[in-house]
Each structure stands twice: as structure tokens, then as C-alpha cells.
Image (cartoon, helix red, strand yellow):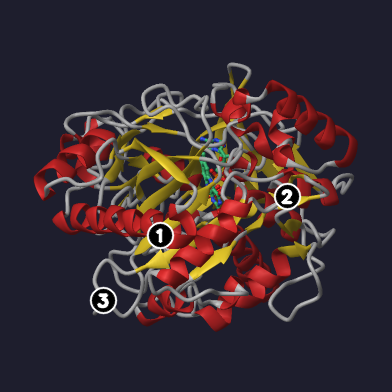
């Protein structure tokens, strides 16, 4: 193992692997990537339909348990997060989506100079290796495999038609910054397999002598020489190790862990740090704050056509398995979301604030196992949510999971908009295109409820969308954690690059945006290295 590098990257997830690839393109740069988990090279990670198998594995999933949430009747929500190379891209639902023009123009208008839609779009395209037809909207030469779904369930087309029947537009190409309507989504995959950033970016950099990837390396904190970051302390196989850095340390440990590493390094709210006996290097009040996540609750119906509830028909399950292994086709080759839509909770809103995902399957409401009858799900998210939570330390020990204090429905508008989202889903199921397939209600059991009953049901059953952002907020103001070049305020030689820097959640799933952040960070670091 090297004990010195030009660039140390902490966390080999969606952003971290992209960054490691790009920084090591220059053979002059010695790059070390430290990842707490193992490689993602395992069978069920590669199979698109393998999600439920990998979510149950604590070796590759952080499986955080959030604090008891008073806005959810005291429930604790499990926060899944990839703990392996590829991070979230190795464990996620594989939906490919970039966000809306107004998301990023909003960032730029609020102090994130250089992050408007027109400025981030080239990074989305640069990252992408699109398997579909040539198009101005997509990149062909990147390392993140993106493909049209190998199989689109007929109910996805019915969902799109139902959306038009209740007044939404149909969008043919949703990667151009317009999400105001309904569309069939793409998947982050290549040749019928999941394309994580380990699979895409790291494999393509394999063999570079100037890139060293260390797995099983749990980073404790950043080391400093005065105000300059000069290395990283981490634990591997029970041994504490230090690695020194000539250039920069870049933290890419995700929305939960990046702020925790800053806090253990003495950068955060002074009082909290002192409480754990950590010397305060920079009293940065916002580290860990501004946590926001998609509230999420499904609406499920039983239907009269075969869906992916294959346990009803073991013969079909067998033929699907064969189809996948012989031809990489069929049900196992596809991500579970087949269509999406964005709608408004109120007609006067300038932009949609309800996100809907359609899945041609349904789960047992209590056990979350695949239901034995055929069904369809529309999952509803509020986007962006107005509620804010916080990440704090539980102790100064890196092995202790940080405390996730989410408070999902702290802001009343999130509950109101979630209710509106469910009313909208009910209208979709009642629209002629879908109504003819629906034979029963699965969850919620009743579709007509008073507002109080809805609120009760939502607090009792909502979970998260797994798109947390915001805990190392980027901005130009004094209290932002990082500036628009992703440099941590108050110190030198330290950046953060992952979902935690997003000041406001883009109105979408967050894997492609995280990769975009990694790509853009690489250019920022390379430019700075040229100047110095
Ligand atoms: C179950 C699930 C489903 C999802 N579905 C989708 C989807 O369909 N489409 C989509 O676009 N997005 C989806 N997402 C979200 C998306 O995958 C994540 O937002 C994205 O991967 C986050 O990227 P990141 O770079 O910010 O962090 P991550 O990818 O989480 O990377 C952080 C990395 O740092 C490592 N790390 C953390 N702490 C330390 C430490 N102390 N020392 C060393 N290493 C450390 C982690 O193990 C991890 O590998 C989903 C997420 C989940 C969990």
C-alpha cells in the first residue's frame, strides 16, 4: 500500500469511482481510493432484478436505523445505502434520470455558480454510455451504461395513457431537462446487467499503476498540517493507518457519512464536537444539517393480467430465469420501475412537486414480500420535500453509525402534498386506460379517507425514497459547507463531492446527479492542480 498520494478519495460510491477514474487519467497523478466495503463483484448485484437479495446483506449495505421519528408516530426507518465499491449505484433500483432544468438553474441562482442546467449537462453526457439509438440528448463514450428497458410491461404503456387521460403530457425524451409529464424510463445497465460505477468507471481504469483502490478501509478522519489537509486516518483489518497527501483529499462518502467524517475531523458545530471531545478546527454550523429525503408511500392494486408477481406461476418463473441466463432478456433483465410521471399537488404551481413511479408488481403490505397475486404499484414521492433533518455523531468512533434525525413530515406541506399525490394516483387507477385491469385494492385498503385518516395512514406507513442529499451544502454564502468549487470552507486542500453537497434535491432519483458531481469535481481538481 502506498503511504503517500497526490489525491486521496474517501468513498468509492457513485461520485467517488467516477472521480477516481478521471483523476487517474493523468499518469502524473497518484490517486488512492479508500472504500469501507468490499468489491461489488457478486452475482445478485449484477442481476437487475436482484435488488431484494442485496438489500438484505449487511456486508454490502450500511442498513442504518434512523432515530425514532416523532412525525412518523415514533417509527424508526431503515436507511439502505451501498457499502461496497459503486456505493449506491451497486444497490439501487437502477432508474436513470438527471433532473429538470429548473432544479440546476435554481442551484445556480442561489449561489452555486457554475451549476446551472446548461453547465452540468455536458457532465451528464460525458458520464454516459448510452445503448439506445444515437441522439443529441445522450453520450455514447462515457462509463455509466444507460439503456432503454429491455422489456416494457404493457401496464407501463397503460400508465402513460392513464396519465394523458388525467391531463399530463407524454414526454418522449426526458433527459433534456423536462420532466413535466409521463415517460418510460431508462435503466443504468449494460448488456442486461447492472452498471455500477465500479463496473463502469473502475474496471475501465484497472491496471493503471497510478490508481490504488483499497477496500475494507473505514476512514476515521482527515489529518491536517495547520489548516491544510495533509492526509487521512483509516482503519483496516483492525489496524489504524495514516496515508499522507501532497495534493487534495476529496470526501465522497455520501450524504450520511461525508458530514460524519468532517465532524470527526473537527469541522462542524463547535458545541457538538466538544461534546465528543473533538478539537474544533472550523466551527461550521451547517455540517450535517439540511438533510432532506423523498417521503415515499406506495399505492397498490391487484390486476387481471400477469405481472412480475411470478410466484403465482412457478413455470413462468423458471422460463424467466432461463431467458435471463441464455439471452439476458425478460423480467430479470429489467429494473422494477418501468414508467414515471411528475405532477402538481396544486394546479397553480410553476413546476411539478409530486413524483410517481410505476412498477408492474405488488408487495404484501405487511411483510413486503412479493405478493402471490398479480398487481401493480404506483409509488409516490414529494419532491423536493420541505422538511429538513440532521446528521450528528453518536460518538467519535468511526465504527459507530452516525445518528440520522430525519423528521420526515416536520413541515406540514409535505404531508399535504403526499395526500395530494395519493389522490392523483387514485385518479390514475380510475382512468379508463388502467381501470380495465384493476380487480381489487391492496394498499391502502380504502381509497376514500378523510384528511385526518390519510395523515394517520401516511405517518404510519411512509418510508423514504433513498435519495438523501444536502448535509454538506454547497453555496456562496458564509455558512455553506462547501463553495461552488466544492472546497470545504475554512481549510485548504479538502473538498466534498457527492449527494451531500446538493443544496436542494433535484426532482428525481440521485445516482446520475451524484456521478455528474464526481465528473465535475474531477475538472475542478485538475484545473486547480494545473494552476498550482
Ligand atoms: C435502495 C436504493 C435504491 C435507489 N434507487 C435509485 C435509482 O433507481 N436511481 C437513482 O438514480 N438513484 C437511486 N438511489 C440513490 C442513488 O443510488 C444514490 O443517491 C447515489 O448512489 C449516492 O451517491 P454518492 O456518491 O453520494 O454516495 P454513495 O454512492 O453512497 O457512496 C458513498 C461510498 O462511501 C463509502 N463510505 C462511507 N463511509 C465511509 C468511510 N467512513 N470510509 C470509507 N468509505 C466510506 C460507502 O461504502 C459508499 O461506497 C437509490 C439508493 C438506494 C439506497
Q: Secondary structure at mark 3?
A: loop
Q: Residues within 10 Å of mark 3 (few under 14, many from 20)?
A: few
- Kindly identify which numbered label has been placed on residue 31: 2
Looking at the image, which is closer to me, 273 or 325?
A: 325
Q: Can you give x and y, in whole percent of width and height, for residue 338 in the image?
A: 59, 53
Q: CA distance from mark 2 to mark 1?
A: 39 Å
Q: Can you give x and y, in whole percent of width and height, for residue 390 in the image?
A: 28, 45
Residue 431 shown left or right of residue 526 in the figure: left
Residue 301 appears in the rendering: yes
Q: Which residue is mark 1?
A: 355
Looking at the image, which is closer to me, 415 or 299?
A: 299
Residue at screen point 40% across, 61% down: 431
Up-down relation of residue 294 to residue 176 (above or below) = above
Residue 254 shown left or right of residue 231 in the figure: left
Q: Is mark 1 within 8 Å of ligand 1?
A: no
Residue at screen point 86% across, 45% down: 206
Up-down relation of residue 442 to residue 455 (above or below) = above
Residue at screen point 72% across, 70% down: 126
Marks 2, 1: nearer the viewer: 1
Q: Can you give x and y, in whole percent of width and height, for residue 233 in the image?
A: 55, 34
Q: Residues within 10 Å of mark 2 (few under 14, many from 20)?
A: many
Question: Sequence order check: which comes first, mark 3 or mark 1?
Answer: 3
Q: Ligand 1: which quarter?
A: top right
Residue 404 shown left or right of residue 186 in the figure: left
Marks 3, 2: nearer the viewer: 3
Q: Quadrant of residue 45?
A: top right
Q: Which residue is mark 3?
A: 347
Looking at the image, which is closer to me, 8 or 61?
A: 61
Q: Secondary structure at mark 2?
A: strand
Q: Secondary structure at mark 1?
A: strand
Q: Quadrant of the C terminus?
A: bottom right
Q: CA distance from mark 3 to mark 1?
A: 15 Å
Amino acid at each position: 500500500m502506498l503511504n503517500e498520494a497526490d489525491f486521496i478519495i474517501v468513498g468509492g460510491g457513485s461520485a467517488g469511482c467516477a472521480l477516481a477514474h478521471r483523476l487517474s487519467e493523468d499518469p502524473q497523478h497518484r490517486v488512492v481510493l479508500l472504500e469501507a466495503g468490499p468489491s461489488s463483484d457478486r452475482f445478485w448485484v449484477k442481476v437487475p432484478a436482484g435488488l431484494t437479495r442485496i438489500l438484505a446483506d449487511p456486508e454490502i449495505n450500511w442498513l442504518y436505523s434512523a432515530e425514532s421519528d416523532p412525525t412518523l408516530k415514533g417509527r424508526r426507518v431503515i436507511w439502505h445505502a451501498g457499502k461496497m465499491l459503486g456505493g449506491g449505484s451497486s444497490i439501487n433500483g437502477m432508474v436513470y434520470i438527471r433532473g429538470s432544468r429548473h432544479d440546476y438553474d435554481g442551484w445556480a441562482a442561489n449561489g452555486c455558480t457554475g451549476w446551472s442546467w446548461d453547465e452540468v449537462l455536458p457532465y451528464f453526457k460525458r458520464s454516459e454510455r448510452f445503448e439506445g439509438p444515437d441522439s443529441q440528448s445522450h453520450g455514447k463514450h462515457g462509463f455509466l451504461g444507460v439503456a432503454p428497458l429491455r422489456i416494457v410491461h404493457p401496464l407501463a404503456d397503460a400508465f402513460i395513457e392513464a396519465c394523458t387521460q388525467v391531463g399530463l403530457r407524454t414526454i418522449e425524451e426526458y433527459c433534456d431537462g423536462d420532466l413535466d409529464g409521463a415517460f418510460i424510463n431508462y435503466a443504468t445497465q449494460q448488456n442486461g446487467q447492472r452498471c455500477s460505477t465500479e463496473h463502469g468507471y473502475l474496471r475501465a481504469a484497472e491496471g493503471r499503476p497510478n490508481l490504488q483502490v483499497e477496500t475494507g478501509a473505514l476512514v476515521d478522519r482527515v489529518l491536517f498540517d495547520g489548516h491544510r489537509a495533509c492526509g487521512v486516518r483509516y482503519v483496516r483489518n483492525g489496524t489504524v493507518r495514516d496515508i499522507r497527501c501532497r495534493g487534495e483529499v476529496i470526501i465522497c462518502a455520501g450524504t450520511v457519512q461525508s458530514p460524519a467524517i468532517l465532524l470527526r475531523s473537527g469541522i462542524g458545530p463547535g458545541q457538538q464536537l466538544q461534546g465528543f471531545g473533538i478539537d474544533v478546527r472550523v466551527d461550521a454550523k451547517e455540517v450535517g444539517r439540511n438533510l432532506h429525503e423523498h417521503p415515499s408511500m406506495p399505492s397498490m392494486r391487484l390486476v387481471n393480467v400477469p405481472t412480475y408477481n411470478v410466484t403465482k406461476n412457478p413455470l413462468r418463473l423458471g422460463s424467466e430465469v432461463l431467458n435471463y441466463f441464455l439471452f439476458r432478456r425478460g423480467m430479470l433483465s429489467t429494473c422494477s420501475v418501468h414508467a414515471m410521471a411528475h405532477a402538481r399537488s396544486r394546479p397553480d404551481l410553476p413546476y411539478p412537486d409530486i413524483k410517481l413511479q410505476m412498477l408492474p408488481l405488488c408487495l404484501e403490505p405487511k411483510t413486503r414480500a412479493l405478493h402471490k397475486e398479480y398487481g401493480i404499484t404506483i409509488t409516490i414521492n414529494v419532491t423536493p420535500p420541505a422538511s429538513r433533518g440532521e446528521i450528528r455523531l453518536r460518538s467519535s468512533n468511526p465504527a459507530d453509525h452516525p445518528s440520522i434525525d430525519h423528521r420526515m413530515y416536520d413541515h406540514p406541506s409535505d404531508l399535504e402534498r403526499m395526500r395530494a399525490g395519493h389522490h392523483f394516483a387514485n385518479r390514475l387507477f380510475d382512468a379508463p386506460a388502467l381501470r380495465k385491469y384493476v380487480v381489487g385494492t391492496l394498499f391502502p385498503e380504502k381509497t376514500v379517507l378523510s384528511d385526518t385518516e390519510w395523515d394517520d395512514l401516511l405517518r404510519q406507513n411512509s418510508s423514504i425514497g433513498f435519495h438523501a442529499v444536502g448535509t454538506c451544502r454547497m453555496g456562496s454564502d458564509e455558512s455553506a459547507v462547501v463553495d461552488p468549487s466544492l472546497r470545504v470552507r475554512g481549510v485548504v486542500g479538502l473538498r466534498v463531492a457527492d449527494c451531500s453537497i446538493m443544496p436542494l434535491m433535484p426532482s428525481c432519483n440521485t445516482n446520475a446527479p451524484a456521478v455528474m458531481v464526481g465528473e465535475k469535481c474531477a475538472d475542478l481538481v485538475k484545473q486547480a492542480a494545473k494552476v498550482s
